[in-house]
Amino acid sequence: MAYTHRPLVIRAAGRLRLAFDAPENAEVADLTPGRRLILNCGSLGQPRDRQAAGSYLVLDTTAGRVEFICFGYDVHQAAGKIRAAGLPVYFAERRLQGK
């Protein structure tokens, strides 16, 4: 799977079918033993979930759970640094819009 820039849980939903779930901030998912999941933490730098916040996940295999966390930071400052570095303006605008 390519890097999607989005928090994502992919699970089996029947024979040859997959279900895609976009978790919310601080959402906790139980990890059922024997059940296969694909977990994507999202993005720290260029999210595509229309949230300007960064995201990560905490995977606790002992407790059998995963928690998705979103966090805010000064996206205007980050966009300014993108522009100051001479990168395409599009990258700065996308940073502000989360897409």
Image (spheres, rainbow, N blue to C red):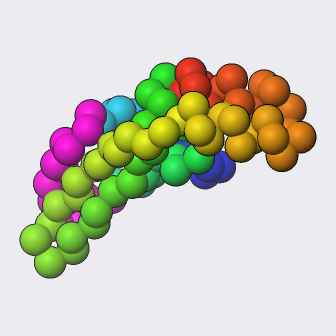
Residue at 14 percent across and 78 percent down: it is 62
Does residue 26 appear to the left or right of 14 in the view shown?
A: left
In this rendering, is residue 49 above or below 78?
above
Residue 95 highlighted magenta (yes or no): no
Q: Is residue 62 above or below residue 27?
A: below
Residue lying at the far bottom of the rendered structure: 62
Measured as percent of width and height from the top left, residue 47 is found at 55, 37
Which residue occupies 52% across, 47% down? Answer: 43
Query: How many marks on residues?
Result: 0
Residue 58 appearing in the image: yes
Q: Main secondary structure of the magenta part?
A: loop
Is residue 49 visible in this depiction of the protein?
no
For the point 53% across and 35% down, the residue is 75
Please tell me which residue is depicted at 17% across the width and 61% down the height of the picture. Answer: 65
In magenta, the rendered stretch is: 24-36
> 55 or 41: which is nearer to us?
55
